[in-house]
Amino acid sequence: MKKLEKRWMQILPFMLFVILFLLFAPPVSAEKNPGTYEIESSNIRLTVTLKGEIYSIFDKKSKRNIPFKGITVFVGCSSEVISIDEEQQALIVKKKVVNDNTQVLYTTEVFSFENDLLRWELKILPEGNAPWSTPVQTIWSISQPGLKYWTTWGDPRPEKQGVHLLQAADEKILNGEVVLTDNKLPTNVWADPLVTQPLFPRKLIYGGSIYGDPEKDDNFDPWINFYPGSRRNYFSVPVIGLYNEKQNIGVSLGFSPENIGVEACLEVTNENQLIFSRYNNRFTPGKELSFSTYINLHEADWRSSMAWYVDKFKDWFNPVNPNVHEFSGTSSYSFETGDFDVDKMKKMAYKTNWDATFPFPYMGLFLPDVNHDEGWLSWRGEYLTFKKIDDYYKQMQEKGFRVLSYFNVTEFGSNILEKGKYNMRLPERKQWVNSNTYLYKQLEPAVLYYPHDTTYTNYIYSWDRSIVVDPGEPVYANHLVEQINRYIEKLPHFEGITIDRLDWTRHYNTHRDDGVSWFNDAPARSLHVSWNSIINKIAPILHDKNKVLFINNHVKRLDDIKQVDGIFDEFGDVAASINTNAFLCVNKPLLGWCHNKAAIGNDFDAFMQKHLHLGMYPMAPFPANDHALLPDEEVDQLYLDYGQLLKVMKGKNWVLEPGVIKVVGNKAKANIFKTDSGIIIPVTFGQDNVVTLKVKGIKNTDKIEIIHPGEKEWTTIKTSRGRLKIPLKRGCAMVRIYSP
């Protein structure tokens, strides 16, 4: 007993020391290993170096380390770390950045977690007396061979850097001709965007085009107009996935549409680097700006990359007005207001006409300020009244169809002349009769001139010799708001608008300052900023009255469409355009254009099947379609053959669960949507007469039906352990799964 007491007395001081150390010792530093810091969530451990750079990401679920490195670079600048601190499960890295002209800015990079996402926020605070700018790059590199990647590209195939087609090629593209890029890859031949690719060198422009001087940066182009058929190296949703398919591990990088920046470009290099560059963002002393990047770990499936991003930024992907799906169907851009074959059009899944009667007297004045019993001469030379327009809308609704009214926020007038050559003697209330008078008396501050024009005479002309205007200018914004209110007040059967020509949003107003843009080494107003300003004014007015808002977006940018309910794509017969818009419209209706029969191509079935694959409606052959597909016996039959398949896409939402569907042996293409009709699976481009599908989540009580092109009735089939044997006709079948 005495020996035990003696031994206890020997170890007691040591135990007391341990207890006191545990109670009063300082918290453990985030520096787990020499030269690194670490933070972790339930499924991710992030390692950051003493230079403030991402060193690796550890996936706790698979217990695999991903050698993924990330860094922020300010082009032409040097940087030094000031401090690295840990606060509430976040790493805060502060740096000083200096350019060659000794201009200084301070950055704070915050690495933290939002649920299962790693958030990487960059805050920039410039110092000094003068604003400046340089590209801000987020660079990742990963040292793993055999990786593949995916993004929301117009075309997954590689091409040479700096490939720009002349605008003259557009006319050939729209006439159905195939135009080759410099490395002989066809520009207007569709390629499935739902595929991964090896990390080959490539540049992809966010939205399609960055207006600027290509001598300053080869990602810029000097085109005044931009058409989506002019190139295919662009992307629409800023999310990129990297995949190790053998280990079934994927990592995605997504950029917040809330602060994407003025312009952006994604580059893949020979060194397995991904470089996301932000351009034309102004560093104003004392004014902070920020950019947010999110990183997520998941399965090696492009659907996983899209799923978390759509969920995180659902307000950009879901329509504000859910009733917009009532406009889903094949469509037209017609000025026909008389009789047509209603039953035939319904069999073609026809639903919506974008009103091409052009009731406006000229571009930009869509409904003039007249009394209800007064009339005016429309652009097409027809005498119109509010009642006559509304009667047409009512007539279409009674037939079961919808009408979208024409709207435009960036073009004004008809045959605009030089200042001074207009009628100044019209009374103020009648100034609208002459677009020159109305422009120079009321709206002149909104004119957009060529960059840095000091004569105020170099207008940018457009359709019908209208001129380009800046919708961010208050006087023009007020004019547009008045127009929207007039539609609502004067036309009881008005249902919504389609806004035309977003290609002008590429430009900069060098006579104005939006406080955030830097163009040609000077302040300017980006028309992307102007677009978001005006859309935030008119969209709430429309939505408050249960109206819908579509756009014709020549430029494909997610950050442009938060207030938008659907897209009416004028380049629905251009391969890269439909691919990029399909990703923008995973939960919104996408109506596509077809310019003529030649644009369908030689393979009529392929034309229809790429639309089914992407959940997109092609334009219907309709009487008096304006620069669009007209009735034709062969074309009409194609639409009648596919009408039943198109109808069940109404209410489409993409199913983005990883591995949800697979075609055994890759003998066909398949996509999967949740719709008003249940779950639908368009099976397209089949190579065999029968293909086998593996589909997750089928219940024993589910009813499964199929229909083929040219058929009128659905046929019931059975499943065996989630496998479906699908007979194909013309390489195609539509599968429908629903609970009876």
Image (spheres, rainbow, N blue to C red):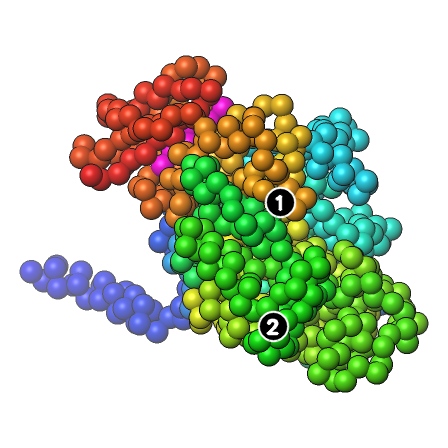
Residue in the image at 62% along x and 65% along y: 384
Q: Amino acid at mark 2?
A: Gln
Q: Position of residue 530 (x, y in %)?
A: 67, 69
Q: Which mark is residue 624?
A: 1
Q: Amino acid at mark 1?
A: Ala
Q: Position of residue 306 (x, y in %)?
A: 47, 46
Q: Is residue 511 found left or right of 114 in the rendered image? A: right
Is residue 96 at least partly visible in the picture?
Answer: no
Asked if the stretch drawn in magenta spans residue 116, the answer is no
Secondary element under disc 1, as helix, strand or loop, is loop
Q: Is residue 237 found left or right of 414 in the rendered image? A: left
The answer to whether mark 1 and mark 2 are in CB contact below 8 A is no
Residue in the image at 31% along x and 29% along y: 714
Q: Which mark is residue 483?
A: 2
Q: Residues within 10 Å of mark 2 (few under 14, many from 20)?
A: many
Residue in the image at 46% along x and 64% along y: 493
Nearer the observer, 405 or 666: 405
Q: Is residue 716 found left or right of 433 in the rendered image? A: left
| Among numbered discs 1 and 2, the one appearing first in the sequence | 2
The span picked out in magenta is 680-686
